[in-house]
Image (cartoon, rainbow, N blue to C red):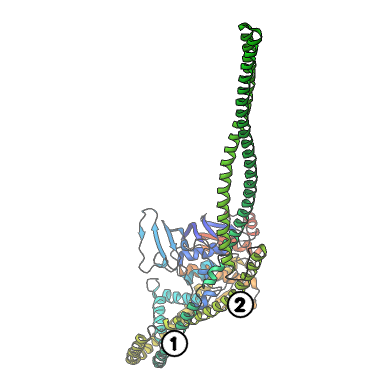
Amino acid sequence: MLITRLKVDYFGKFTGKEIELKSGINLLYGENEAGKSTLHTFIRGMLFGIERLRGRGAASKEDVYTKYLPWDYPGAYGGQMDIMVGDKAYRLIRSFHANDKSFKIIELRTGREVKLKEGHISELIPGLTEATYRNTISVEQLRAETDAELASGVRNHITNLSIAKSREVNVAKAIASLKEKKKALESTPYDAQLKSLAEKIKECEARENRIDELTLSLKDLEHKEKNLKISNERKKEDELIEQLPAILEKYRTYQELKNQYSQIDSQVVESENKLKEYQKNIEDYENKQEESIKSTKSKGLLFLGVSLVAIILGFYFTKSYIIGAIILAAALSIGGIMLLLSNKNKASLREYYLKYSMSFEHDKKHLHELIVRRKTLEDGCDELHDSIMLYIQRFISEEELTPGAIDRLQEAIRIIKTEAAREQNEINTKLEEYRFQIEKIRWELSQMEDNETELIKNKEQYEYIKQKQQENELERDAVNLALNTIHKLSVSIHDSFGLQLNEAVSRIIAAVTNNKYQDLKIDEKLNIKLGWNDNYIILDRLSAGTIDQVYFALRLTVADLLIGNEPMPIILDDSFALYDDNRISAALTKIAERNQVILFSCQKREKQILEDLGLEFNYIEI
């Protein structure tokens, strides 16, 4: 198998991350926290999926699902990986989300989906299981040792090859099936189940009594809660308190109207005085007009009398009509001059009258408008005054609407609100306590909804298990006999075929240790000893670096042994932390022979050593 492309849609810290991989060595460099382990886990997840842990496991470091669940788009938890198997290219597409989990394989040349019976990658690549992957081709950070699953897998594989000389006969699968069967049989100890069911039946009966008690308690609490809610309804006084801002706004409006009223009232008085002055001037004009008319009449009569007397006397003394005519003409001239002077005086008085009459009418109209405006303001002030005083007197005793009264009103309401808040807090606390107790009881009752059904089911199950108990004992004895037989056979066979495993591992360990260790022995449980000066040293007594090298060699050998038909990539996550430069050079030289190596590192020295060795590699910075 060759991994050619990673497309991390949403996984851990990565979103839309694409990486192209090649055959040979791929060195993926990144500093700590850059996401190397995230990509390593992503490859494993694309091959085998990621299961969400339950219970205590969900809060542990082993909960890989939660650790790499995207924060921004958890529903898009997934990605793609392109691989080559033989001469065919495939695309693996996975959604890891627990509520939308899916896995499909697309053959890229045809675009057809590859149907898997059980949905496991081992159906496409025989021998590739998660245990094999974890213990051979994938070396996680600071974790080089193998575990019991690998030992079992190698032992079973040796048995297969030794007995059948072929991988077609799957002894490992037979053993796994027997162990699974045994585990299933042993996981249902009927005596314990019967005892457990008897206890469950007893518990169900006790729960029935508990349900009755809880139901009565729930009714009592709901009744108390209802009564408290009724007493907690808002009172009329509370509603009035909420009107305080509006009353304060009314008071501000009242003061403004009052100020406007004072200004308008002053203008009314001023206008009235002005009209009185106009009225006096007009009356003076009318008096003068009347006197002028009387004077004119008197002067006319006097002039007429004087003229007649003058004519008579002139004629009497002169006896001449000419002198009389002259006297008449003179009298008429004097009369005309007097008339002209009288008319001019009348015109002047008329102009004076018209001027004051127009001003009088204009100011009279303006006075009317002012009076109407004053009345409107007075009515508005009275209405606001009555409304505000009515509100104030519901809280305090006041006779006049003054700023002091307003201040006392606000203080009285502040005291009322403080007390009301205290009482409300007490009520809320009590209500919260009732709600908590009610919800607690409801939750407890909800857990016992199926109690009666469970009671009937437990009784039926009790009878069924009694019948199955005898059958189980016979079947379990048969499985144990089969497992013991196969185990004895695999141990016997290891003595002959295990030599091949020892030789293969010895060749690799010799290469990676520069021939310091050449003889290595592995028993059927993968216990390891190294030859040194004609003695065999237990692996645990060697240095950490040497132990790391031995397990590394074992992984490479076992990977080929378990998945021999398809060359597999080796995936290393900072696996050379305990190696010195010489050991790294030897290890890199050895793995350069592999079909593909994916090496994650946070150090520059692997890149430098690869360049010094002249080995080709694909360098990628994360």
Residue at the spot 57% in from the left edge and 66% down from the top edge: 391
Based on the displayed image, in which of its 4 quarters is residue 489 positioned? bottom left
- The one nearer the camera, 334 or 498, is 334
Based on the displayed image, in which of its 4 quarters is residue 27 positioned? bottom right
- The one nearer the camera, 88 or 456, is 456
Q: From what the image shows, is residue 352 above or below residue 120? A: above
| Mark 2 or 1: the one toward you | 1
- The one nearer the camera, 85 or 602, is 602
Q: What is the x, y in percent for residue 472?
A: 36, 89
**Residue 569's disc number:** none
* Mark 1 neighbour density, 10 Å: few (under 14) some (14–19) many (20 or more): some
Q: What is the x, y in percent for residue 496?
A: 47, 78
Is residue 113 toward the left or the right of residue 297 in the image? left
The residue identified by callout 1 is: 214
Figure quadrant of the C terminus = bottom right
Nearer-N-terminus badge (2/1): 1
Query: Type of residue at label 2?
Result: Leu
The residue identified by callout 2 is: 539
Query: Type of residue at label 1?
Result: Leu
Number of marks in the rendered image: 2
Q: Do the residues labelled 2 and 1 touch (CB within 8 Å)?
A: no
Res 197 seen here = no
Q: What is the x, y in percent for residue 465?
A: 35, 90
Give the Cα distance between marks 2 and 1: 64 Å
User: Dot 1 lies on which element?
Assistant: helix
Q: What is the x, y in percent for residue 214?
A: 44, 87
